[in-house]
Image: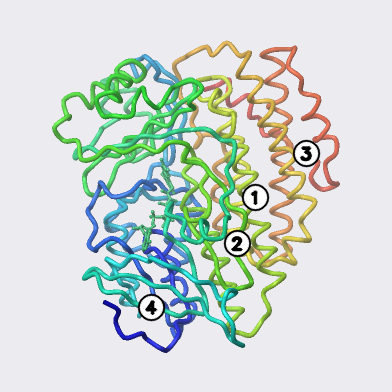
Amino acid sequence: MHSAERTAPRDVVIMGGGLAGLTLALQLKQLDAALDVLVLERRAHPVPHAAHKVGESTVEIGAHYFDKVLGLGEHLRGAQLRKFGFRFFFSEGRRDIDQVLEIGASRSLTVPSFQLDRGMFENFLGDAVRRAGVHFVDGALVEQIELAEAQAGPQPLHRLTWRDAAGEHHTAHTRWLVDACGRAGLLKRKLGLAEPNTHEANAVWFRVADRIHVDEWSSDPAWRARCDPPARWRSTNHLVGDGYWVWLIPLASGSHSIGIVADPARHRLTDFNTFEKAMQWLQRFQPRLYDALDGRRAKLQDFAFLRKFSYGCKQLFSPQRWALTGEAGLFLDPFYSPGSDFIAIGNTYIADLIARDRAGERLDLRAGVYDQIVHSFYDSTLTLYRDQYGIFGDPQVLPLKVIWDYTYYWGVLSQIFFHGRLTDIALLGSLRAQFLHGQRLNLAVQDLLRVWAKVSPHTTRAGHLDHAALPWFAELNRSLTDTLDDAGFRQRIAQSVRQMGQLASEIAQLALACDATLDTAPLRAVLADAPADAAPREPLLFAAALEAA
Ligand SMILES: Cc1cc2nc3c(=O)[nH]c(=O)nc-3n(C[C@H](O)[C@H](O)[C@H](O)COP(=O)(O)OP(=O)(O)OC[C@H]3O[C@@H](n4cnc5c(N)ncnc54)[C@H](O)[C@@H]3O)c2cc1C
């Protein structure tokens, strides 16, 4: 059956009302309440709590987007959990958690992030977009799309057909069409935009209806008192080993999310792709977690896996008024939880393009530049993960990698987002030399870390590398809350890139001190080629801090 067609075209139709689609709808209405936005979501609302979707841990950009850009702080602070940063334990094969190296801050750093129960969040967002005047239809399956390019007429519109929960068919016409339907990738498939990458990793995950209290894994009072508050359980805890990591993420609904993510060259997916096999695998590789889960088997809520989860996309934004956001476009790797960051960035660009289109601006140039910028973020971020899983079990090299990756993330990408400069292409263009130098430094450091982990002794040791005790690192996090004019923003990027140079140089020294045969020449060549104001100046005394840990 086909209902009477609505003749008035929509301004925007968003296919998929998950995290990316619902937040984009909200952002659009906040920017322009007059926009007519339709969101079509396949699942019926309310969706279940806890065992709904992965994408539970946020980092600074995503958290800032939800909290400050969309103004959802009340829900985040009242209904979700404040995250106690990220935390890593070199706990492979060990039950004595207090005798392994721990990386993570002893107190919360300035900028908040949150653990999201995705079911609770999407239900909240569904209500919020309806209140904002969005036409949000749940239980609605998009079946066919016809893009405006394929149609005749002076003002061609995109056309799509969808089926509602009662099985009735509908047609919608729209000026803008956004694909936010996740891995279903409707537009990507239609336009052949899929772009595989060479990052091979697989994941399994499950939820248990109980808390996993990492803080209670040792009775040693000194170990327990390391963190203030003693609330490691609110961190995204990573239990790391060679070629894999295991996540522990608490959810506000009272459940805990657990995932195993591994490089198939070291750990085959078939070794842990059922709950029983995952438990056997944990018993061998992460026995302390196995102990915690063994008595909670009856509380298992779900189990899922995903083979080769990482992929790219040839194009995300088109001047022909279509766009892709969230996992409908690209996804990298959950190790540092960047999924929500890419939603924040993609949505901000889409909202900007739609606003400019409404103002009558041509989009040809701008849509292309935004696409290039996101792809450059994607390429840089991919280097953090690709061929890097061999580092994860290395207590010498991983601490450096984490510091390096975060210095780059907070120093450059986060500064652009927090200071609202994402769409200022003239300003970003004027900083091109700095950004390029940062990228080249990052590539050279990632290469060195990867080779270093192959020769380092992987010596385990007890201890705590406390990020809150690295003043420059804590300050870098805090600096995201500054208010900067253009001159201040330029100075900030130059300062960050200088800081990266200093850190890179100290990493090279540490690598050579560990193994004098390591080739640091490529990194030194990049360092020597720094733009005038990006040359390292002040030491970070990073090496000294590491020794003290
Ligand atoms: C193993 C793993 C771990 C991850 N961990 C994290 C993390 O800790 N932190 C983080 O930030 N990110 C993480 N991510 C990424 C995160 O999952 C994504 O960023 C996020 O879920 C993407 O949201 P989305 O809205 O694009 O997709 P989804 O949330 O999947 O939403 C897409 C929606 O489209 C709907 N849909 C599909 N087809 C149709 C159709 N034909 N018609 C109508 N509706 C349709 C679906 O029902 C769905 O609700 C992880 C990803 C993986 C693979």
Front tag of 4 and 2: 4
Q: Marks 4/2: CA distance?
A: 41 Å
Per the image, label 1 sits on a secondary structure element best described as: helix
Task: Answer with mark 3 or mark 4, whichever residue precedes in sequence.
Answer: 4
Q: CA distance from mark 1 to mark 2?
A: 11 Å
Image depth: mark 1 or mark 4 in front: 4
Q: Is residue 242 left or right of residue 280?
A: right
- Disc 3 to disc 4: CB gap under 8 Å: no
What residue did someone put label 4 on? 171
Q: Which residue is mark 1?
A: 412
Residue 234, located in which quarter of the rendered image?
A: top left
Closer to the chain start, of discs 1 and 2, is 1
Numbered label tally? 4
Question: What crowding class fits label 4: few (fewer than 14 Cα within 10 Å), some (14-19), or many (20 or more)?
Answer: some
Look at label 3 and name its amino acid. Arg
Judging from the image, what secondary structure is the residue with disc 3 in? loop
Do the residues under discs 1 and 2 have CB atoms within 8 angstroms?
A: no
Residue drawn where x is 31% and y is 38% of the image = 304
Rate crowding at label 1 as few (under 14), some (14 to 19) or many (20 or more) other CA atoms within 10 Å: many
Q: Residue at horizontal 84%, vertical 46%? A: 531
- Is 15 rendered above or below residue 392? below
Which residue reaches farthest front?
1
Q: Nearer the viewer, residue 495 or 159?
A: 159
Nearest the camera: 347 or 187?
A: 187
Label 2 close to label 3 by CB (< 8 Å): no
Please name which of the two marks, 3 or 4, marks the residue nearer to the observer: 4
- The image's mark for residue 419 is 2
Quadrant of the snapshot with the N terminus? bottom left
Percent x, y of residue 503: 68, 34
Question: What x and y, as percent, mark residue 348?
Answer: 54, 66
Q: Label 3, on which residue?
A: 537
